[in-house]
Image (cartoon, rainbow, N blue to C red):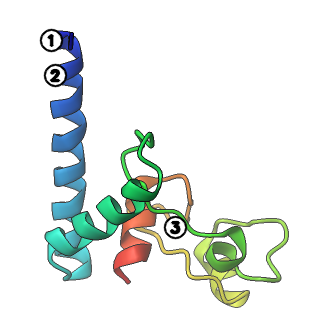
Amino acid sequence: MIQPEQIYADENIYNERLSLYKKTEIVARLPWHYLAAFDQYERSKEPNNNELVAISFPDELWYGVGNTSFHQDIQSIQIFGGIGQDGNGDGMANPNNPEDVLFTAAQ
C-alpha cells in the first residue's frame, strides 16, 4: 500500500521538474515539453532513477577531451571543446547540477 507521504513526495518532485523545465524553456527558448520528453526518454532507460533530471553526459563530452582535471569553469570547458553549459549563472558547468545539465541539453 502506498503511503500518503510517498504521494506528496512524488508530487513534489514532479512540481520541481516542471518548474525546472519551464525555467529552462525561458532561458534556452526551447519548449518545456521537449525538455520533459528528452528527460523522460533518459529516465525510461533507467527506470529507478529518482534524480531531478535523468539526462547525463559522458565526462569527455561534458568537459572536453583534454580537460583531464575536469575543471568546471566555463572557460576551461570551452578551451577543451566540451559541451557543458552554465544553466544557473554561477560561472561553472557542473554535470551534477540539474540546471546546468538541462540547459546543456537544450543547447
Answer with the quarter of the image where residue 68 lies: bottom right
Mark 2 / mark 3, whichever is N-terminal: 2
Residue 37, horizontal then vertical, whole percent: 24, 68
Of callouts 3 and 1, the N-terminal one: 1
Q: Is label 1 in a helix, a strand or a loop? A: helix
Query: Of tags 2 and 3, which is closer to the observer?
Result: 2
Q: CA distance from mark 3 to mark 1?
A: 40 Å
Q: Residue at x 22, y 30 (%)?
A: 10
Could you tell me if residue 13 is visible in this image?
A: yes
Q: Residue at x 42, y 55 (%)?
A: 54
- Mark 2 to mark 1 CA distance (whole Å): 6 Å
Question: Can see residue 89?
Answer: no
Residues at circles 2 and 3 in contact by the CB criterion of under 8 Å: no
Where is mark 1, residue-wise?
Answer: 4
User: Marks 1 and 2: in contact by CB < 8 Å?
Assistant: yes
Label 2, label 3: how many angstroms apart (C-alpha)? Answer: 34 Å
Q: Amino acid at mark 1?
A: Pro
Q: For numbered disc 3, what is the local secondary structure? A: loop
Name the residue located 23 percent from the left edge and 18 percent from the top edge.
Answer: 6
Residue in the image at 57% along x and 69% along y: 57
Label drawn at residue 91: 3
Q: Is residue 64 left or right of residue 41?
A: right
Q: Is residue 6 above or below residue 24?
A: above
Q: Which residue is mark 2?
A: 8
Q: What's under tag 3, amino acid-wise?
A: Gly
Name the amino acid, label 2.
Tyr
- List x then y, in percent, for residue 33: 15, 69
Query: Residue 22 falls in which quadrant of the image?
Result: bottom left
